Image (cartoon, grey):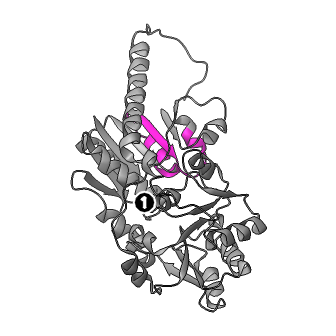
Amino acid sequence: MRVLIFCLSANFFGTERHAVELANALAEEQEVAILLPVRPKSADRQLGYDTLLAAVSPRVRLFTTGRKLPLLGLLRVMAVFRPEIIHTHLERSARWGLRLPFGPPVIVTNHCGHRPEYDECDGLICLTPAQVAQLPPGRRGAVFQIGNWVLPGPTRDRATARGALGLGPDEFVIGSVGRLDPVKEFPALAEAFLAADLPGTKLVIVGRGVGEEKLRAQAAESGGRVVVAGFRPDVRALYPAFDLFVLNSSDEPFGLVLLEALDAGLPVIATATDGARAIAEHAPLHLVPVGDRSALVAALRAGRDGRLAPTAGAAESFRIGAILPRIVQAYRDVIGRRRRSVSYASAIPITTHTNSHSG
């Protein structure tokens, strides 16, 4: 099967990593290409993009396209690679994939909330049952519920990971990872952490984004208790530096960082978003209500006191080896549906008629 992974985002957040990891895994048994945007001109985005590009396996054929007219790059891939299916990620990729004249089936993964473009795709992968339940009526394509996965993290000892973040060996460290966008609620997390008044404890936040300036201002006023580590290409190797992990999002479709924290065996606190609730059905997350500061403060104190259980082995059910066959089967189902519909259409007798409208 020839599969094209299509993602027009130049970041290195969960969606982009998902797309590259999927391409790499598929390439073990399928013919796979990935289409990404060209390198961004903005210097603050180039590190993330370069990290993304470096993560692409040599087994995957890499193509790039301009952001303004990505259809040109897509047409080139169609001519050179001739994919049997296009797997798009985020709405811009889905929109352009659907514009291909006589193109192959398009399947999309709903990473960040439903978009109208998804209703026109041949297939839609929802990460959680909640996403499936929220779908509008009348969509034409097949729907699959397939969650995220986590790859085994790189091995790094605790001392090395702490050294990379400038942390002392005896500090209790609460970690959080993600893009610094309002939906992640990092300023509220910092406020709750400071309100919890935990002795000998630091909160380390790894990531970058539009909320970085505000968060750094909070960190500057915290007396060193809040640390903003910025973007780190080695983020998977930093989890051993943490004693506790927390994710305070107001909305989280799935939460790859939660799986990474589980993979590191950390006690995990998460707000009860759709994604966290789906993960909690298979792993011991400590859930708190979204926006409930008192509950978050209490959970942070419980974690600091050692009253939250570690999660060693909890990530095993989320390994890509168990999930990849379901994605491949979704591809086969979508391709089969397209072929059956084309076969049916070709069997309909062609009739000549006059349309009352011209032009």
Q: Relative to 159, is 144 above or below? A: above
In the image, 57 versus 315, the foreground residue is 315
In the image, 140 versus 228, the foreground residue is 228
Residue 104 location in percent, x, y?
37, 34
Q: Which residue is mark 1?
A: 67
In the image, 267 versus 31, the foreground residue is 267
Residue 343 location in percent, x, y?
38, 15
- Circle 1 — which element? loop
Q: Amino acid at mark 1?
A: Arg
In the image, 36 versus 242, the foreground residue is 242
| Lateral position of residue 336 relative to residue 118, left or right | left
**Residue interval drawn in magenta:** 91-118
Residue 54 lies in magenta, yes or no? no
Q: Is residue 242 visible?
A: yes
Q: Is residue 102 visible?
A: no
Tell how many labels: 1
Q: Residue at x 60, y 42 (%)?
A: 116
Q: Residue at x 55, y 79 (%)?
A: 172
Residue 136 location in percent, x, y?
66, 35
Q: Residue at x 46, y 52 (%)?
A: 315
Residue 356 location in percent, x, y?
61, 18
Q: Relative to 240, is 359 above or below? A: above
Q: Residue at x 44, y 58 (%)?
A: 263
Q: Quadrant of residue 296?
A: bottom right
